[in-house]
Amino acid sequence: MAIESYRSVYTVNGRLQAVLVQSVLERAGVPVALKRSISGAYIDVFVPEAFVFDASNLLHPAPGAAEILSARAA
């Protein structure tokens, strides 16, 4: 897929953070592309348009989402 059909969902300032975010998304079945910013100071995390909603929910969960999951595990 061409990067033009992808959308940035997250920006990090280091390779380790980028790989961590990439790993989280790919384990959830979301394709990922990493691209260094023009200045080279940051790395943008891109996903296909069809996965933007899922990626956003994984990277920015709703407040209280962790508590719901913890309650089910107990």
Image (cartoon, rainbow, N blue to C red):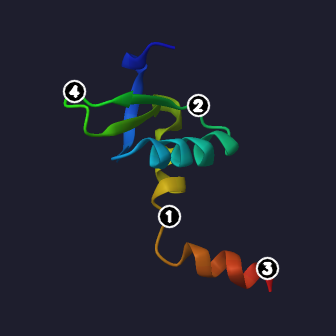
Q: Residue furthest right?
A: 74
Q: Tell me the number on the disc at residue 41.
A: none
Residue type marked 3:
Ala
Residue type marked 2:
Pro
Residue type marked 1:
Pro
Q: Which residue is mark 4?
A: 38
Q: Which residue is mark 2?
A: 31
Most foreground residue, 1 or 68: 1
In front of the other: label 4 or label 2?
4
Element at label 2: loop
In front of the other: label 2 or label 1?
2
Locate residue 69, reporting x and y percent: 68, 75
Locate residue 49, reporting x and y percent: 45, 30
Does the image show residue 8? Answer: yes
Locate residue 40, reporting x and y percent: 25, 32
Most foreground residue, 17 or 61: 17
- Residue at (33, 47) in percent of width and height: 13
